Amino acid sequence: MSQQPSAAPAPATVTVARRRDWWRDAVIYQVYPRSFADSNGDGMGDLEGVRSRLPYLRDLGVDAVWLSPFYASPQADAGYDVADYRAVDPMFGNLLDADALIRDAHALGLRIIVDLVPNHSSDQHEWFKRALAEGPGSPSRDRYHFRPGKGENGELPPNDWESIFGGPAWTRVADGEWYLHLFAPEQPDFNWEHPAVGDEFRSILRFWLDMGVDGFRIDVAHGLVKAEGLPDLGGADQLKLLGNDVMPFFDQDGVHDVYRQWRHVLDEYAENELGPEGPSAEGRWWATGGRIFVAEAWTPTVERTANYVRPDELHQAFNFQYLSTDWDAKELRAVIDRTLEAMRPVGAPATWVLSNHDVTRHATRFANPPGLGTQIRTAGDRELGLRRARAATLLMLALPGSAYVYQGEELGLPDVVDLPDEVRQDPAYFRGAGQDGFRDGCRVPIPWTREGSSYGFGSGGSWLPQPASWGELSIEAQTGVAGSTLELYRGALRVRREQADLGAGDAVEWLRAPEGVLAFRRGEFVCVTNTSGESVTTPAYGRVLLASGELTEADGEAKLPADTTVWWTTA
Ligand code: NOJ
């Protein structure tokens, strides 16, 4: 039988999918599986809990869900210590639950991004156990960084690096050798110079791509490759993730070779998979393909962050410079400009983020005086913090690019700053002798209902105690309540979808504004944010689409209360 020349319809489909590039303006919601929803009453969130609440996320209006690790793990660092990258930890469910979650999400028009942890494994990983058992000189040790110690009897660590969680970055094993761990001792760093490590991770990528995930968040993406010879640092301040120097263990140029290889794997899938564009079962736009990588890369500058999202590398990188910026118009404008300028030459979308599972929630960060960093121990002025957090969210969602929302921020949750020591689990807290590592405060399970066991999180309590005030912050308490933070997020995400000028893009047009105020235009859309502590008068730019606080308008002018953002349309 003669065949028609196979000039296949594929190119047309490719164009469609590329044009839509869903991730360029996606709002991605971070689920911290331990603390989202507990389906079996053991006090710990799980995958079935997440699956059962997907309709909530669909209704919230996000595009994708990023799940922090749920792999088999001894949980020395809440799952960022992976013992088996192809298995689900029983405390979260099993692979069938993961499969059901991915399928249900897709049916609802939501994409799923999983967390990949390639810098280190758990010390309970098969490879590490074998490396320990087989001893010095064995090939299995080469997959990690084992070294003899310094000093007469090798009693000193091989170099002066410190762990991010405090203490030396080296631990000595019974046979006298030391191994490197940038984080906890239970998290030995892989040696990415060893080809087996790269092979293994490309295979892990394929495993999860075959499971149907839409992307990967890459943990410690800047850490995989270490400077040759593991040189001493000297006197540098090592613990600062976001410093001004490139460390011999962070942001080495060699990491980019890894991501170029990974990109090939992803593109292979994309090319094989582009399917017809069409609405999902729920009526939302949906097309297969378009899987992405997002880098967790704490680099010294946004310019260096841009290196991770060059066209043949990753798609997005978290903007930690933005996350670390105080509530100050001048500083915000500077970081926004710098971000957009840095991303433009590489053609990647800017990203914006205010909170995640590693930092003090922004409602608490902004409740405190500026300059305290991202691990804050004081509640501060709650009312002020919430007002600013709401304004900050509207500002973030108006900027060009993609935005990340951390579970519970849509409820205006504060950090829990008074957790008793005996419930804390953050390894950094214990290694830092109680002076660091306050991450448990942003990881407390979220409240779904006003009353009931753990406010609807589950039927069996919660692994970290929730404050008594959380019933009133619950999803139930805020749903349908005009002016609630939850309805503000829903409204903002709805408007973002409706307004053609919001979302993707690489520029804003700044407008003249009083001291302490940010004002910019994007086509027919105008956003004004008042970070000053006082009310200000600005032009009323048109019809108010949304506001984080109550403003008054008269005679073509608008009076914006302190710490408020307004969205206008001039159409
Ligand atoms: C970054 C993760 O976000 C954090 O939670 C973890 O402790 C470290 N990487 C180590 O994996």
Image (cartoon, grey):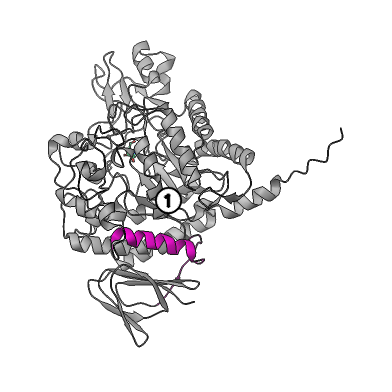
User: Residue 166: in sight, yes or no?
Assistant: no
Q: Which residue extends farthest right?
A: 2
Looking at the image, residue 478 lies above or below residue 441: below
Please state the quadrant of the image where ligand 1 appears.
top left
User: Residue 62: in sight, yes or no?
Assistant: yes
Instruction: Give the quarter of the image for residue 463.
Output: top left
Looking at the image, residue 305 lies above or below residue 426: below
Identified at 36% across, 52% down, the residue is 405
- Residue 312 in the image: state x and y as whole percent: 56, 44
Mark 1 surroundings within 10 Å by alpha-carbon count, few (fewer than 14), some (14 through 19), many (20 or more):
some
Residue 492 highlighted magenta (yes or no): yes
Q: Which residue extends farthest bottom?
A: 555
Q: Which residue extends farthest top?
A: 134
Looking at the image, residue 108 lies above or below residue 326: above
Q: Which residues are magenta?
A: 484-513
Q: Nearer the viewer, residue 276 or 567?
A: 276
Classify residue 413 as left or right of residue 569.
left
Q: Nearer the viewer, residue 80 or 284?
A: 284
For label 1, the residue is 58
- Residue 5 in the image: state x and y as whole percent: 82, 41
Residue 494 highlighted magenta (yes or no): yes
Instruction: Give the quarter of the image for residue 120.
Output: top left
Looking at the image, residue 371 lies above or below residue 114: below
- Residue 303 in the image: state x and y as whole percent: 44, 53
From the image, which quarter does the N terminus lie in? top right
Classify residue 235 as left or right of residue 400.
left
**Disc 1 marks which amino acid?**
Arg
Mark 1: which secondary structure? helix
Identified at 44% across, 15% down, the residue is 139
Q: Nearer the viewer, residue 223 or 360?
A: 360
Q: Nearer the viewer, residue 44 or 255?
A: 44
